[in-house]
Image: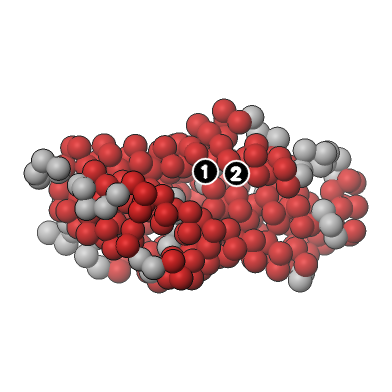
Amino acid sequence: MNLFSPAEFVENYTAIGEKKAMAPVWKLLLLGIPGGLFIALGAAVASTAVHDIANVGLARMVSGLLFPLGLIVVLMTGAELFTGNSLIAISVLEKRTTMGRMLRNWVLVYLGNFAGALLLAACCAYFGQLNYSDGGLAVYAIKVATTKSAMPFSSAFVMGVFCNVLVCASVMMALCAKDVAGRAIGAYVAVAMFVICGFEHSVANMFYVPVGLFATTVPKYAALAAQAGIDTSALTWGNFLWKNLLPVTLGNAVGGVGFGALIWAGNRTKKA
């Protein structure tokens, strides 16, 4: 067969997760930056394509077709991604690394992801990428950011759980493949599902909300958003960090670790 079985995946990822957990600080930070950048690029591509589509179902479908390209690039380039690294829980359960080492990996990669996504958000807002449709893309970015910033904590958490179940399923399917095409398809399918459903991804939100925040500081974009009737009172850095990013991050961690633990429990070949 041209793919690894779930049991073989568990065995293979045990070694992968151990290596990730033991990686030096500089490497995790450095590889976290392109990880965040590529996911942000997937978000930017999707937003650009759908910003002028009025039909919600069609817009979600187009986003689902395009956003997963970011994860494919992450996996193919060896960049580090916080959400996918939830699977290091498999290595912890196999006693090949520790909880502390896993959390260390998460924090460092998360910071790198944030830096990469924030960089793209600032560049899109301040160097003209949002000018599509006479600033219509900027209005769309502000609207999305405002909606995410006003989301209830519980909703953001639960949407984060289901998002990372699907992201980690995509990572698993990609790593089960033995060729480039199989890995790309594996990375694509479940991520498209979470995007179409509108689930919440912490690293993607490191782009979606900051790009809207940055856009509101550009007078032209702020004026267009006001003309469109968008109430941006909820769009603040505080709301982004505490009412969106925090619960989504927690939900992503729970969903990813939960998925990894279930796959491990159902497919391990020996007692840990």
Q: Is residue 161 left or right of residue 40?
A: left
Q: Position of residue 247 (x, y in %)?
A: 56, 37
Q: Is residue 8 left or right of residue 195?
A: left
Q: Residue at x 65, y 66 (%)?
A: 119
Identified by mark 1, the residue type is Thr
Is residue 169 among what the camera can see? no
Which residue in the rendered view is the most extreme toward the left?
270
Identified by mark 2, the residue type is Leu
Q: Residue at x 60, y 49 (%)?
A: 205
Q: Tag 2, which secondary structure?
A: helix
Is residue 109 among what the camera can see? yes
- Residue behind mark 1: 249
Q: Residue at x 57, y 28 (%)?
A: 154
Density class for disc 1 (Cα within 10 Å; few <14, some 14-19, many ≥20) is many
- In the drawing, what numbered circle is on residue 245? 2
Q: Is residue 104 left or right of residue 132?
A: left
- In the drawing, what numbered circle is on residue 169? none
Q: CA distance from mark 1 to mark 2?
A: 6 Å
